[in-house]
Image (cartoon, grey):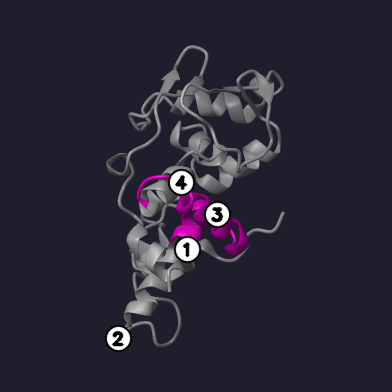
Amino acid sequence: MARYTGAVCRLCRRYGEKLYFKGPRCFSPKCAFERRPAPPGMHGLRRRRVSDRGVQLREKQKAKRIYGLLERQFRTVFSQALHTPGMTGENLVRLLELRLDNIVYRLGFADSRNQARQLVTHGMFQVNGRNCNIPSRLLKPGETISWCRTALKSEYYKGMVRGIQGKERPRWLSLDLQSLAGQVMTAPERQDVEPMVKEQAVVEYYSR
């Protein structure tokens, strides 16, 4: 499946904030954004006036990069949010958060969404006791996610167990630290998601 394969640290510098694409590295002095916070390119330090349209495009592109979607996939999610009762922006954030790869990341099973996506496509997880390797699968409240039997024997799993204790999880997810099985307790609300994306700007971009 197609995905972004460029340098992710350039994206953080382009959008002017950390997007945590590289997990622990983003919290270390090696973080590219900490060393060079200016936008990439020879004119990175130059001030630029951005139109309202440019701001909307920027927020749409940032949301795509954060959740690892391409344009066609993102449009599909937006269309679903548009036809769901409620505020379109909040629906969009909720649908993005309920993706299987994002939930794997939120539970602390992976250091980044890209890594979570790779784990899911490699068949490391089960949803409601059945194997699932579709990163875009939307989970509903009450559904559970657990590791498959073969994953329990992997070196990655053994290393992940040692570091998951201190990781924080959103309140709409629960995790059994004994079996390392997670559950979606309720649909996430907008206040449960860090405000990294201005979803209203995304709605305005597609509503032109």
Residue linked to disc 2: 49
Q: Is residue 7 left or right of residue 46?
A: right
Mark sitting earlier along the chain (1/2): 1
Q: Amino acid at mark 3?
A: Gly
Magenta-highlighted residues? 63-87
Q: Position of residue 5 (x, y in %)?
A: 63, 62
Residue at 52% of width from left, 34% of height from top?
Answer: 104
Residue linked to disc 3: 68
Mark sitting earlier along the chain (4/2): 2
Q: Quadrant of residue 54?
A: bottom left
Say if mark 1 contacts mark 2, CB within 8 Å.
no
Camera-near label (1 vs 2) is 2
Q: Secondary structure at mark 3?
A: loop
Q: Secondary structure at mark 2?
A: loop
Question: In 3D space, how far apart are the residues under numbered discs 1 and 2 (Cα atoms)?
Answer: 23 Å
Q: Position of residue 142 (x, y in %)?
A: 48, 21
Residue at 55% of width from left, 54% of height from top?
Answer: 68
